[in-house]
Amino acid sequence: MKNIIVIISLFSLTTQAYTQKGKLFNGKDLTGWTQHGTEKWYVENGEMVCESGPDKQYGYLSTDKSYKNFVFSVQFKQEANGNSGVFFRSDIEGIKIKGWQVEIAPLNFHTGGIYESYGRGWLIKPNPAHEKYLKPGKWNTIKIQVIGDQVTTWLNGKMMVDLKDEKIGLGEGFIALQIHDGGGIKVRWRKFKITEL
């Protein structure tokens, strides 16, 4: 019995050594993030908000830290036109971002799919039958797991896509939230969670 307890304890310690939970958003300000572009990013009622500005251009808010292998989740609520996204293993110059985006968009526009900006475009879209898992105007949870060359996404607990891609496996960079161009966009974000693997 003692041997079993020792083995379980060692396994627990080993697991902790290879995973690290982090805090991305303090609920008060944008400490730990960098804004790109002129679109609006602010904190209201403990929630992060992105909103189109007068220039109606693309806008991004990126983590100051880079993340390679991780499990990330966040709750979002789309107000007005909710075309947005979560980028991973990305870098940026001005408002031109290079990397991969997990789409967050209005109903039937492929939330949970993976898009490569300034590259190959759509890499994978969700099954059309899964589009219904999005709850427009309500809080939704997107979960993203990135390990090596494999990316898996879930929307409200339902798997949306699972992709293996050699180019993604070679990627490095930050996590970023997006405001799409065109104006009229407003999205709220809360309950950020990340575990590095």
Image (tube, helix red, strand yellow):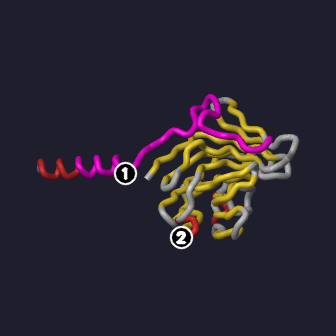
What residue is drawn where x is 61% and y is 33%? 31
Q: Residues within 10 Å of mark 2 (few under 14, many from 20)?
A: some
Foreground pick, 60 / 171? 171
What residue is drawn where x is 85% and y is 47%? 56
Q: Is residue 54 above or below residue 120?
A: above
Kind of element beneath mark 2: strand
Foreground pick, 38 / 156? 38
- Asked whether residue 14 is drawn in magenta, I would say yes
Residue 87 spot, x, y in % from top left? 64, 54
Residue 154 spot, x, y in % from top left? 56, 58
Find the residue positioned furthest to the right. 54
What residue is drawn where x is 59% and y is 50%? 174
Identify the residue under disc 2: 164
**The residue stretch that appears in magenta:** 9-38
Identify the residue under disc 1: 18
Residue 11 spot, x, y in % from top left? 26, 52
